[in-house]
Image (tube, helix red, strand yellow):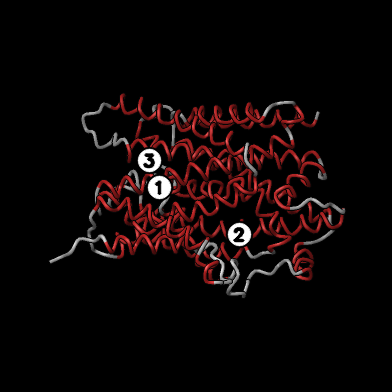
Amino acid sequence: MVVTLFLTVIVIYFLALLLVAYFTSREATNETFFIGNKSSHWALVAFGMIGTSLSGVTFVSVPGTVELAKFSYFQVVIGYFIGYFVVAFVLLPLYYRLKLTSIYNYLGQRFGMASYKTGALFFILSRTLGATLRLYLVINVLQLFVLDQLHVSFETTTFVILIMILLYTFKGGVKTIVWTDTLQTFFMLLALVVCVFYIMGDLNLSFGETIDKLNESGHLQIFNLNILDKKYFLKQILGGAFITIAMTGLDQEMMQKNISVKTLGGAQKNMLLFSSVMVLVNFLFLLLGGVLYLFATKHGLSVKGDDLFPTVALNHLPTAISLIFIIGLISALFPSADGAITALTSSFCIDILGVQRKEDMAEGKQMRIRKMVHLSFAVLFLVMVYYFKQLDNKSIISILLDVAGYTYGPLLGLFAFGILTKHKVHDKWAPLVCILAPIICYFFQNNVPVYFGWTYQIGIELLLLNGIITFVGLWLIRKKTD
């Protein structure tokens, strides 16, 4: 009975998304799909981006890390906050000045077509891997705790969810995503706040008493002072800043929503509001992890990690709270995929196929191509999620955390070289530099410390190292000036 109720809530939630899509996609054009006719309100974009940035991985995984890693993740969050200012005051002015639809157009204008397409392809690779992993993780939680009991297969669940996403993004694109992400962010944050305060109530603890309890147990520890450790605070803060610059400021999915705001000032206000709220929200997720730890200790639960939050929410809390958790979980699920498919479609059509560069191509033909690409990415997502199901969950997570460093590093190097220097490069060699940089990073990360007996561990700063190697490589292929 309870499982059927959960499924009913999921269906009603999806119908609400379809209703939003209907009203936002009427008379939609390619410009509507790509940049929302540049009519998005900055406050809506800021609020909706919270859901996109957090995703299902944050919703499920961050609370589960607190028992072992304490509040050390907040070091990265501090870095995120710094990075958002760079995005707001360095990158956004550049994108608005050049009137970009795809941010990788900058690389074409600055260096040439090879650099342009290389940047776009690295984005497509990284976003495809990252988005499908996040989609898989959340679908897997829904499957294990709800749909297996209804004898619905994982393959059927994935297929139906991707069909749902296609239905509400197929026509309206960014204009629809801005509104659906706002709705989904609201429900995700509602689930977060309700679960935190309900569990504190169950433990008979006020907010202040909860903080005191976590402080006594050592779980409030934020800063790691061991310079050789992966979680050393300067590495975490610096890495967090560059992750934001690369994975927000150099990411078409995130910037596609920002540049849909009519003015630069509005986009900058969006980024500053978004960055401030993100700090608070991430702290609440860590606090949730702390109260889940206290709850598990009180009730003698041995479950840990990613399974902790779903297990407590669905098996040890009242049905009403469990329903709110389910709504929050699916609200974390959809932004993991809908914005990604939309941005990947935009990037592939504009950057790789060049539909906007072909002035003689009719709007109708552009729209047909865009719809075919959109459908193709949905099929690719389906295949990737099925593939991840065949692998070990933990190995996927560890591999793809590194993949972000490997794939966004060349983008960081390309944009940094373009912005910080005035040099042109031999464009035909840029793809080789961007391919070699991650390869060098891989061998350095896995072999050099072993050969030299170093105890230093390369962690989150892998992205920065990759970017620096790319920058140096571009310097070596620069054109000599007279």
**Which residue is labeled 3 in the image?**
347
Amino acid type, residue under disc 3 in the picture:
Ser
Q: Tell me which residue sits at (43%, 39%) in the image.
A: 344
Q: Quadrant of residue 387?
A: top right
Distance between the Cα atoms at labels 3 and 1?
Answer: 11 Å
**Which residue is labeled 1 in the image?**
122
Question: Percent x, y for residue 357?
Answer: 25, 37
Quarter holding the C terminus is bottom left
* In this picture, residue 467 sits left or right of residue 429: right
Note whether residue 337 is visible.
yes
* In this picture, residue 251 sits left or right of residue 472: right
Q: Tell me which residue sits at (59%, 52%) in the image.
A: 398
Looking at this view, name the residue that lies furthest to the front: 451
As rendered, which of 318 and 136 lies closer to the eye? 136
Between label 2 and label 1, give the one nearer the viewer: 1
Of callouts 2 and 1, the N-terminal one:
1
Amino acid type, residue under disc 2 in the picture:
Leu
**Which residue is labeled 2 in the image?**
280
- How many numbered marks appear? 3
Quarter holding the N terminus is top right
For the residues labelled 2 and 1, say whether their Cβ atoms are less than 8 Å apart: no
